[in-house]
Image: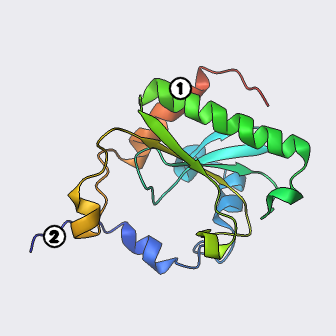
Amino acid sequence: MDRLWAPWRMAYIDDMDGDGPAGGCFLCAARDADDDRRALVVLRRPLVFAILNRYPYNNGHTLVVPNAHKGEMDTLSDDEMLALMAATRDVMAAFRRSFRPDGFNVGINLGRPAGAGLPEHLHVHVVPRWSGDTNFMPVLGDTKVLPQSLQDSYDRVVAALAEDAPSC
């Protein structure tokens, strides 16, 4: 049997509770970080921010997050909801320019039974998709092959977002 080594996945396995290594909210930790590149924060706005997912489903998998630590949509103010959707739109536009995906998966998992790894802090998943981006590896090898590093993805999306004027 061939092996594809992915040692970075061990951090995910070790952190299956979704709360981050220090037991706190990893999204709040990213929000409060002073080094955006290290924290993978690609966008900051007054009410929301966006961060690359450290354990992506696909290249460029981004989380758009309200700054406030809230777990349910009905707890967001109208301004927070608008800012969340506007940032989601702007992240998608930046990916269209810089990565040229054929489509996107955009979604919110509310509650652990719905797949939320961190149900206490709501976030929108933005996953760029390309025709033919799936292959036999996830089915037969239970492994997803990503052809680009997180830092390369970070550099490309930050450059594309810098072209936009903030809308919210």
The picture places residue 126, in percent across and down from the top left corner, at: 56, 46
Q: Name the residue under label 1.
A: 160
Residue 3, numbered label: 2
Q: Quadrant of residue 8?
A: bottom left
| Front residue of 126 and 121 | 126
Q: In this view, does 107 lie above or below 110?
A: above
Q: Which amino acid does label 1 sit on?
A: Ala
Q: In this view, does 151 lie above or below 1?
A: above
* Quarter that holds the N terminus: bottom left
Q: What element carries label 2?
A: loop
The picture places residue 105, in percent across and down from the top left corner, at: 52, 46
Q: Do the residues labelled 1 and 2 touch (CB within 8 Å)?
A: no
Q: In this view, does 163 lie above or below 92?
A: above
Asked whether residue 24 is in view, the answer is yes
The picture places residue 12, in percent across and down from the top left corner, at: 46, 71
Q: What residue type is labelled 2?
A: Arg
Residue visible at 79% across and 31% down in the picture: 168
Residue visible at 58% across and 69% down in the picture: 115
Estimate how packed mark 2 is, as few (under 14), some (14 to 19) or many (20 or more) residues with alpha carbons within 10 Å: few
Residue visible at 41% across and 28% down in the picture: 100
Residue 2 appears left or right of 168: left
Figure colour scheme? rainbow
Tag count in the figure? 2
| Front residue of 164 and 86 | 86
Estimate how packed mark 1 is, as few (under 14), some (14 to 19) or many (20 or more) residues with alpha carbons within 10 Å: many
Q: Distance between the residues labelled 1 and 2?
A: 36 Å
